[in-house]
Amino acid sequence: MHGSLRVSQLGKRYRVVGSKGQRTLRDLVRSGFRRTPAEYVWGLRDVSFEVEPGRTVGVVGRNGAGKSSLLRLIAGVGRPDEGSVEIHGRTGAVLDIGAGLTDDLTGRENMMLAGLVAGMSRREVQARAAEIIAFAELEDAIDAPLRTYSTGMKMRLAFSVAIHVDPDILLIDEVLAVGDATFQRKCLARINEIKASGRTIFFVSHDASLVRALCDDVLYLRKGRVVAFGPTTDVMPVYEAAGTEAGNGAEASDVPDRLLPGGRTLRQGINRFGTLEAEITAVRILRLDGAPTGSITAGAGLMVEIDYAARASLDGIVAAIAIKLPNGTSCFDTNTQVSHMELPVGGTGSVRLRIERLDLVAGDYTVAVGLYDPDWKGAYDSHYNVYGFNVIGVRSTEGVLNPPARWELTTRTEGPVRYSGTG
Amino acid sequence: MRPLGPSADLRRKFELLFELVLRDLRIRYMRSYLGIGWSLLNPLSQIAIFSFLFRQVMPLDIPSYTAFVFCGVLSWTWFSSSLISSAGAVVASPELIRRPGFPVTVLPTLSVITNMVQFLLALPLLLLLTVVDGGRLGAALLALPLVMATQYVLTLSLCFPVAALNVRFRDTQHVVGLVMMALFYMTPIFYSVDAVPEEYLFLYEMNPMVTVVDAYRDILIRNEAPDLGALLVVLLLSIPIALLGRALFLRESARFAEEL
């Protein structure tokens, strides 16, 4: 299928600079031509995911998370040390844009060269030349040497060529940060066009709002590993929660994993985020009679109970609970602040949310719980995608809600009532 | 990559190569007054010096000496410039190496072809000079493509490993420069192999460029058929080395992107 992509167990390692790998002939001679083991760090490891044709996938993560490495491997630049990338169709890439242009050639000559390098034939470039030049808004300057161009003009030319290659899979690496706002909007419009035409797009960006606006799916990388891959609405909250965690400093590796009663593992940075100045020590999902449960019948109620410990130095804490669909969509989201409840700090406590009726359709649900500071500047402890329950009942059609409802019929016809299909 | 047929793939490489050769030539000459004239002036100045030295200062008594030196200098320049530029071919083009699907084997080939174009540009002048300097031109010219093909394959076979090696060991480019300098004197460019004492002749028999330079002189000065047997030996030895070098280059190419 053109435009599909499968990445399995992908790993790429890099030699640590200054380690004992041989770099010069002198090192080789000194070591007596023996191979000294070099030190490696894994830039990417165990990365597996599949993308269906026509999806727009955002790749997010902090600097050094391996986003660009992943894009390069997908583009076929360099070879993976583990695993494989399987691509169907032609890839086009807008990576380190602006490089690869030659100052002494004219814009037109650069356009031809860049087009050929990107995989077009001479004829294809010539056929699209007018379009490329018009998109780059370089009609007047295209025959001038590139060295007379401004940075923005060069960028527009490079981007315009790359985007006219007509690939099945388009890779875009954080390039929209350059160029003026008008051109950025134009690029986004063009990306949307490409998206609408059913191409697969891979999009690396730090701009969360852009990712939310453009992408169907998000791949969240952290230290070369996949933290989450799924629908944008599902993954972006995880990424953004991690962002606040990063700001407040608690490092993932400092916090030991916790094995939960249900058999799941709570791991900082993966499904747990926050500074841990206040800590969720236990979460229980209960029936209204207080018995622990993993499932309820449609229309029944539910309680979520949180045990917590909070340092006395905190100004206060807010507990928040959300019930979500497996794809991350919130069905119900509330917190203690909207109910004007103050939680005491400097000790431990239990807070319980009682939901009298949970009129959700049958299916699986997750419960996200979190403790936040009262100004919502960041999370103290937030458990995401850890707890869950299911609703048993007759699955209605589309939709999330399943309130008590029934059909009522009133007829205002003259003469005998006719039902279609019987007359 | 889009599944290109082998012919489309080859065509793309050819178009790319063509455009890159054009780029190299344009860059080299674009902002200079003499432009393409420089590709003639460089060998011409060498020839003038050699002619003065070995005709006036230390006469070597070689017939049509100017054409003789021109022959040697031109083919040598193609050979050594290709090797020297191929050492930097990969290292100097990180932006191309990092393009998805860029056919890396184009880079060493580009070094050889760009310098071949320089050779071709100077060739008419060489022919003219031969006539003026009392050399004879004739039917032997038909063998010229074979000699050039031999030199092309020979040069390319060495450019692949040199280009690959220089990515790992930047010392390679210095070694190549040194070896080329030594080989310039160890190849009969400005003197005749006839003058070499017999006990040292084996050094010359191992040097494939001796055969190539000699063949050019047979054709362009003496209007004689070149030593086809010797040429074929060079050609047939160069082909497997070129394939091996290309394989080595491709194997190494996986790490180019991160070594740069």
Image (spheres, grey):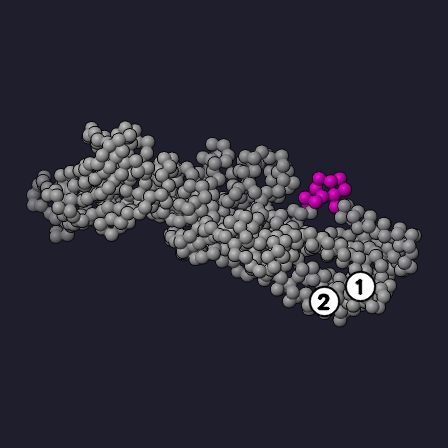
Instruction: Give me the chain letter of mark 1.
Output: B
Q: Quadrant of residue A133?
A: top right
Residue B197, quarter of the rendered image: bottom right
* Relative horizontal placement of residue A319, taking residue A132 as reference (left or right): left
Q: CA distance from mark 2 to mark 1?
A: 13 Å
Residue B101 image offset from top left, x and y in percent: 53, 53
In the picture, the quarter occupied by the N terminus of chain A is bottom left
Return the residue nearer the eye: B91 or A26.
A26
Q: Residue at x 27, y 49 (%)?
A: A259
Q: Are marks 2 and 1 on the same chain?
A: yes
Q: Is residue A255 magenta?
A: no
Per the image, label 2 sits on a secondary structure element best described as helix
Amino acid marked by disc 2:
Val
Q: Is residue B81 above or below residue A194?
A: below
Which picture quadrant has residue A240? top left
Graded by Cα atoms within 10 Å as few (under 14), some (14 to 19) or many (20 or more), the crowding at tag 1 reads many
- The reply, left or right, for residue B32 in relation to residue A83 is right
* Chain letter for mark 2: B
Disc 1 residue type? Asp
Q: Earlier in the sequence, mark 2 or mark 1?
A: 1
Residue B18 at least partly seen: no
How far across and how far down the image is residue B176, in percent? 70, 55
Q: Residue at x 47, y 43 (%)?
A: A173
Residue in the foreground of this view, choosing between A207 and A264: A264
Image point (42%, 41%), residue name: A62
Density class for disc 2 (Cα within 10 Å; few <14, some 14-19, many ≥20) is many
Check disc 1 and report its element: helix, strand or loop: helix
Which span of residues is magenta-colored? B26-36
Q: Which mark is residue B234?
A: 2
Label disc, if present, on residue A342 of the rendered structure = none
Which disc number belongs to residue B214?
A: 1
